[in-house]
Image (cartoon, rainbow, N blue to C red):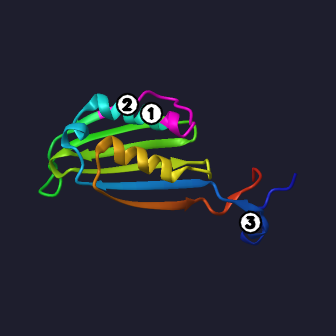
Amino acid sequence: MVHPTSPTEHRETQHQQFGVHLTIDGYYGSPEKMSDTAELRSFLDETVELLQMHKISEPVIAEVGPNNKKDPGGISAFVMIAESHISIHTFPRRGFISADIYTCNNELDTERVLAYCTEVFELDDVETNCIRRGTRYPVENLH
């Protein structure tokens, strides 16, 4: 098998999208739920199940103190999945969460996970972005 080596040959390679990266910023939520480490662990575990993904590590959760005037402290939580990762950062004193779901599964059910996140943290307002990642990911191995 011949592998492309020059920039011209790379342009001739067939490509596909690698995955999607969903970001969720939630506002005016429940400070009690945002500061509950058991709730955050459950959120990560349930999101993995909800999206039919495959957890390869237990969630890592860290309480973080204030960083600066903008960051009054909160909790960061992360779980590694076979498909990539899910993370969430909560700022209970501001009623704010920032979550990321990055997956190589291009069929991510964004509406379902958004509804779940809104329900769990009792969010009044949300902003989302869904970014297509790796849009020139080669269909076949190059090396």
Label 3 sits on a secondary structure element that is helix
| Mark 2 secondary-structure assignment | helix
Q: How many marks?
A: 3
Disc 2 marks which amino acid?
A: Ser
Of residues 81 and 27, which is closer to you in this image? Answer: 27
Is 60 placed above or below 90 here? above
Image position of 34 with respect to 126: above or below: above
Instruction: Give 26 or 74, whichever is nearer the viewer.
Output: 26
On whether residue 56 falls in the magenta region, the answer is yes
Query: Where does the image place residue 45, in percent across and percent down from the top left?
Result: 44, 31
Q: Where is residue 100 in the image (x, y as percent from the top left)?
A: 42, 50
**Which region shows up in magenta?**
48-61
**Mark 2 and mark 3: span between their CA atoms?**
44 Å
Task: Tell which of 102 and 35 is nearer to you.
Answer: 35
Using residue 71 as the reference point, say whether residue 107 is left or right of it: right
- Label located before the other in sequence (1 or 3): 3
Q: Which residue lies furthest to the bottom in this view?
A: 8
Residue depicted at x 14% and y 54%? 68
- Tag 2 near tag 1, CB within 8 Å: yes
Q: Mark 3 points at which residue?
A: 10
Q: Which mark is residue 42?
A: 2
Mark 1: which secondary structure? helix
Q: Is the C-beta separation of discs 2 and 3 under 8 Å? A: no
The amino acid pointed to by label 1 is Glu
- Mark drawn on residue 46: 1
Q: Does the CB distance between marks 1 and 3 fall below 8 Å?
A: no
| Chief SS of the magenta region | loop
